[in-house]
Image (cartoon, rainbow, N blue to C red):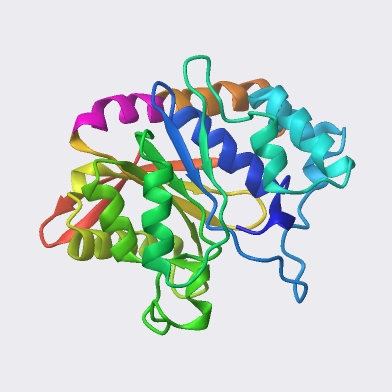
Amino acid sequence: MQNKYVGDIGDFGKFLLLKSVSSGFRLGVNWCLVEDETNNNDGRFIDYLNDDSESNEYKALDSDLYEALKAIVKNGARHISKIEELKLLDSVDSKTQFFDEPRLSPLIDWHNRSLEHLECSEIIFYDPDNGLEIPSVKIDDSPSKKYLFFEEVKAAYDAGKSIIIYQHTTREGKVEEQIIKRCQQLTSRVSIPIRNMAVARFRRKQSRFYLILFQEKHREAIQNNLQNFINLLVQNSSRLVQNKRPMFIIYTCSNHSDSIELRRI
């Protein structure tokens, strides 16, 4: 996560998903914060905040979230501290915890501090800049702070946390192939059962998906939350004049022979 992303269209989708999936749970957010990069235009997709017909889709889904992000961008205050101050992810019953220490080496020590800080959370959302680790970057390499490592995921899952992870898509293969590959890695490297995985794919502007890894004790409740989220999206789409593709696609995962099968719900 970089501060310059705050209020971007991806941020709206991310917070909308988190509010839905974490309903009834104590949510913890690990920003995996890194410094803003100045050599690219990431974070530029804020046109959805214009008051026009396109913005109706977002307002209808969550007007409070929409207006809050619009004010942050308009005031030039694009910083994660604003999300925390405005309590955008708090529920009636629970206050969201945040770990906003910049991602520093050694990463394992940093991650241990984050688990201590988010000890009371039942679900932890990780927002790494690029997503899960890749073979070409090792945990002690300089670019490692932009990735979340399987060792860190395992530590959180073994601590009894359900987990949501941001994952940037690449140009290497179809998105569904990338999703299956990541699920296979989580099974082999972290020992998370396939039945305890779901995926939310965001489909506005820049493609991305969220890996949702739930503890067995949380499985039924999170699956119900995902179904309620789908219902919200469908109801909203039916009210709009424009015929757009769904903002999110939600997949469940299952074993099929020796492979992983995605089922759209």
The residue segment tinted magenta is 217-227
Residue 162 against residue 21 in the figure, above or below: below
Q: How many numbered markers are drawn?
A: 0
Residue 219 inside the magenta-drawn segment? yes
Residue 102 against residue 244 in the figure, above or below: below
**Residue 223 is drawn in which quadrant?**
top left
Residue at x 86% of width, y 38% of height? 50
Please state which of residues 119 and 247 is positioned toward the viewer in this rendering: 119
* Principal secondary structure, stretch drawn in magenta: helix
Q: In screen coordinates, is 14 left or right of 253?
A: right
Q: In screen coordinates, is 240 left or right of 198?
A: right
Residue 193 against residue 187 in the figure, above or below: above
Residue 29, x across and y down, in percent = 50, 43
Q: In screen coordinates, is 4 left or right of 230?
A: right
Residue 110 inside the magenta-drawn segment? no
Residue at x 64% of width, y 48% of height? 10
Q: Is residue 17 visible to the viewer in this orientation of the structure?
A: yes
Residue 170, x across and y down, in percent = 51, 70
Residue at x 17% of width, y 49% of height? 193
Please state which of residues 263 and 212 is positioned toward the viewer in this rendering: 212
Quadrant of the frame with the C terminus: top left
